[in-house]
Image: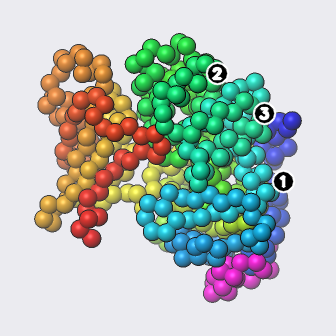
Amino acid sequence: MANYYQPEIETMPLDKLQALQSERLVEQVKFVYDNVEFYRNKMNEAGVKPEDVKGIEDLHKLPFIEKDDLRDQYPYGLLGVPLSECVRIQSTSGTTGRRVVAFYTQEDLDVWEECCARAIVAAGGTKEDVVHVCYGYGLFTGGPGLNGGSHKVGSLTLPMSSGNTARQLQFMEDLGSTILCCTPSYAANLGETITEKGLKDKLKLKAGIFGAEPWTEEMRHNIEETLGIKAYDIYGLTEISGPGVSFECEEQAGMHVQEDHFIPEIINPETGEVLPEGEVGELVFSCITKKAFPLLRYRTRDLCYLTRKKCSCGRTHIRMHKPMGRSDDMMVVKGVNVWPSQIETVLLNLGYQANYQIVVDRIGNNDTIEVRVELTPEMATANDVPVSKREAEIVAGLKSMLGIKVDVKVVEPKTITRSEGKAVRVIDKRDLYK
């Protein structure tokens, strides 16, 4: 069985890594030009020929690809191989517009599962572990990705999917699950239930691999405390394979990008200019080994920065900071840029759990924003602080963070619907008036 901590790859000196990336990029550019009409037309419009890209130093010459391009080419317009060579599709949730459908050859699946295996090993996973996967399965990439990665590591894999919390906890206790894989909001939900039922000392959990939605450092600490684990971040997009594009190691100071398969860039989201290491901007990825659904210079809309600062784990692959938000998820309320993560930080710092909703509306020409947050069970039982005082404290904290006044409504525990998959944090009713 392979050891998915691969020193020859994950600790490769930078010059050798960049030589490998250049070799694979040149091959991939020629491949997409020859096999995907959309890319050929896009490159011709930009005045770029395959021979113009001689290495990663020429990556900036290629045009960007955006999600609208993927929707416009739905379903088969971006296929790089005959459909008969594809063995799997995965898809985005498709909450707005057309779905994005990604295709995989068997080789693509092997690469994806290898990346997920590396993530599990980075979280301390071995063939002795029981990996409890309660990401959704089906078209969503979370379940299939971590499931396949766990198999490659050789771990006993529980393909639980999401939901049915009582059954999750029964299997977790009876089968001795050691590594939990799910969305951070569902991990928080599980932690809350485990605390209520007094199950923490009966479980063998040691680590969690959480992704598919934004979460703050404050939420990480909350999950680690309630579950008694170390919580690791994992990143990926359906369009570029799924989870495992990058992941945290034990240092928990950014996610190592699998640079032998994906080249990251940070750009100015307004101008497209490539920004230097350490500057915050929009994350762009080029897939240099994927064949069925090859994407070059794909704009993710996620905002973060990259660093090559030496990591104590020994891995040399560049790290991406946890995304601070998405350029298209940012809300403009009363003329101010607002990210849900800013609100979550204030709430968790004040002792609340990650059970909240943000409701944005418009009355006449004026925007309104209300944050609904639950009391913790301890707060509700103690009943020693008036709700009005709690609301005033949160209002003050949010005004300090955002610079605008936000209405706050504190509600009883269990009032806000729990998430068993991706949490719905923002309800923007202004969309109804468009």
Dot 2: few (<14), some (14–19), or many (≥20) neighbours within 10 Å?
A: some
**Considering the numbered disc 3 on the image, is that residue within a helix, a strand or a loop?**
loop
For label 3, the residue is: 154
Q: Amino acid at mark 3?
A: Gly
For label 1, the residue is: 16
In the image, residue 208 lies at what x, y percent?
Answer: 58, 31
Q: Is residue 333 magenta?
A: no
| Residue 21 or residue 374, whichever sits in front | 374
Instruction: Mark 3 vs mark 2: give the one in front.
Output: 2
Q: Is residue 422 visible?
A: yes
Residue in the image at 80% along x and 53% along y: 17
Identify the image quadrant of the C terminus. Answer: bottom left
Q: Tell me which secondary structure the magenta stretch mostly adopts.
A: helix
Q: Amino acid at mark 2?
A: Leu
Indicate left or right for 34 with 221 as reference. right
The range drawn in magenta is 34-57
Instruction: Mark 1 vs mark 3: give the one in front.
Output: 3
Residue in the image at 74% along x and 83% along y: 49
Q: Is residue 37 magenta?
A: yes
For label 2, the residue is: 175
Work out how far the residue at label 3 is from the one at label 2, CA to CA, in angstroms.
16 Å
In the image, residue 229 lies at what x, y percent?
Answer: 56, 24
| Nearer-N-terminus badge (2/1) | 1
Q: Amino acid at mark 1?
A: Lys
